[in-house]
Amino acid sequence: MPEEVLFSFERRMDRAEIADYLRTVADTLEGSDDLTLEAGSESVTMEPPSRPTFEIKAERETSSSGGPAEFSVEFELEWDEGEGDEDGSLSIQ
């Protein structure tokens, strides 16, 4: 299925700034509110269900030119209509 990017934002930030954004997302999810993302003239509002799929990925991407590796941690919420609930556990330390 083709992917359509509804919103995109990327910028270097202090870890404390990133933590503030993640806290805002967590508070919004916990409060059962819609999630609105805004940057400049871009904006999107989404309505996560009560049990979306939560995915975390840690990756190391090596450069074909032999440069330094790039590390990333990705947090993703996914959902679609009629999706069933799955059980699982996660620990983040």
Image (cartoon, helix red, strand yellow):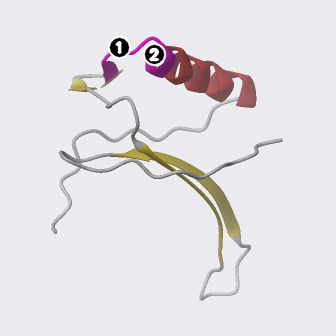
Judge whether residue 1 is colored magenta: no
Instruction: Provide the residue designation for mark 1.
Output: 33
Q: Quadrant of residue 51?
A: top left
Q: Which residue lies furthest to the right in this view?
A: 93
Mark 2 in CB contact with mark 1 (< 8 angstroms) = yes
Looking at the picture, how far across and down is residue 90, in whole percent?
69, 48
Q: Which amino acid does label 1 sit on?
A: Asp
| Quarter assignment of residue 81 | top left
| Secondary element at image label 1 | loop
* Above or below for 77 versus 45: below
In the image, residue 62 lies at what x, y percent?
65, 79
Q: What stretch is highlighted in magenta?
A: 28-36
Is residue 39 visible from the viewing direction of this image? no
Could you say where residue 78 lies in the image, as x and y percent from the top left? 36, 48
> In this view of the protein, which residue sits in the foreground, 88 or 12?
88
Residue 50 visible, this orientation: yes
Q: Mark 2 is on which residue type?
A: Thr
Residue 68 screen position, x and y as percent: 74, 73
Badge 2: few (under 14), some or many (20 or more) residues near its Cα, within 10 Å? some
Mark 1 surroundings within 10 Å by alpha-carbon count, few (fewer than 14), some (14 through 19), many (20 or more): some
Q: Quadrant of the C terminus?
A: top right
Residue 8 in the figure: left or right of residue 44: right
- Residue that numbered label 2 is attached to: 28
Name the N-terminal-most of marks 2 and 1.
Answer: 2
20 vs 14: above or below: above
- Residue 36 as seen in the image, left or right of residue 76: left
Q: Residue at x 60, y 38 (%)?
A: 12
Q: Distance between the residues labelled 2 and 1?
A: 5 Å
How many numbered discs?
2
Q: Residue at x 32, y 31 (%)?
A: 49
